[in-house]
Image (cartoon, rainbow, N blue to C red):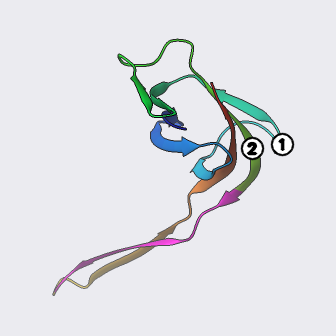
Amino acid sequence: MYAIVEIAGQQFKVQKDQKVFVHRLSGEEGAVVEFDQVYLKDAEGKIIVGAPVIEGAKVTARILRHLRGEKVLVFKKKRRKSYQKMNGHRQYLTQIQIENIQ
């Protein structure tokens, strides 16, 4: 069984007991969060598609930890103009574990 759900502005294909890294969610570690923006659900081979969402469907997950992702380097350069600029970014992430798809 899997579902396509919107979490923090992004769509994810999730299954029960799957661990997913998403953009930072408000909530403490160990808290249970619910997502009701379920677009597609597969229940034992029977696929249900919402228009745009499935009414009454929800996905529950537990927040495991808050962390920061790997550093991404942004380098800009214009040749022959003596212009170089280096910038780094680390995204704030939350690791969640899918507990139930209803």
Q: Identify the image quadrant of residue 53.
A: top left
Q: How many marks?
A: 2
Identified by mark 1, the residue type is Gly
Magenta segment boundaries in residue numbering: 67-79
Q: Please indicate whether residue 63 sits to the left or right of residue 6 in the image.
A: right
Mark 2 lies on residue = 63
Nearer to the camera, 5 or 82: 5
Residue 78 position in % (x across, y down): 20, 78
**Mark 1–mark 2 distance (CA, rounded to whole Å):** 5 Å
Q: Quadrant of the C terminus?
A: top right
Query: Decide: marks 1, 2 in contact (CB < 8 A)?
Result: yes
Residue 44 falls inside the magenta stretch: no
Q: Please indicate whether residue 46 sits to the left or right of residue 31 in the image.
A: left
Residue depicted at x 25% and y 85%: 82
Residue depicted at x 45% and y 40%: 10
Q: Please indicate whether residue 72 sits to the left or right of residue 66 in the image.
A: left
Residue 62 position in % (x across, y down): 75, 40
Height in image: 38 above or below 27? above
Q: Secondary structure at mark 2?
A: strand
Nearer to the camera, 60 or 23: 60
Residue 28 position in % (x across, y down): 81, 40
Q: Secondary structure at mark 1?
A: loop
Mark 1 lies on residue = 30
Q: Identify the image quadrant of residue 15.
A: top right
- Give the dominant element type of the magenta stretch: helix, strand or loop: strand
Residue 60 position in % (x across, y down): 68, 31
Identified by mark 2, the residue type is Ile
Q: Quadrant of the N terminus?
A: top right
Q: Residues within 10 Å of mark 2 (few under 14, many from 20)?
A: many
Nearer to the camera, 92 or 9: 9
Residue depicted at x 60% and y 23%: 58
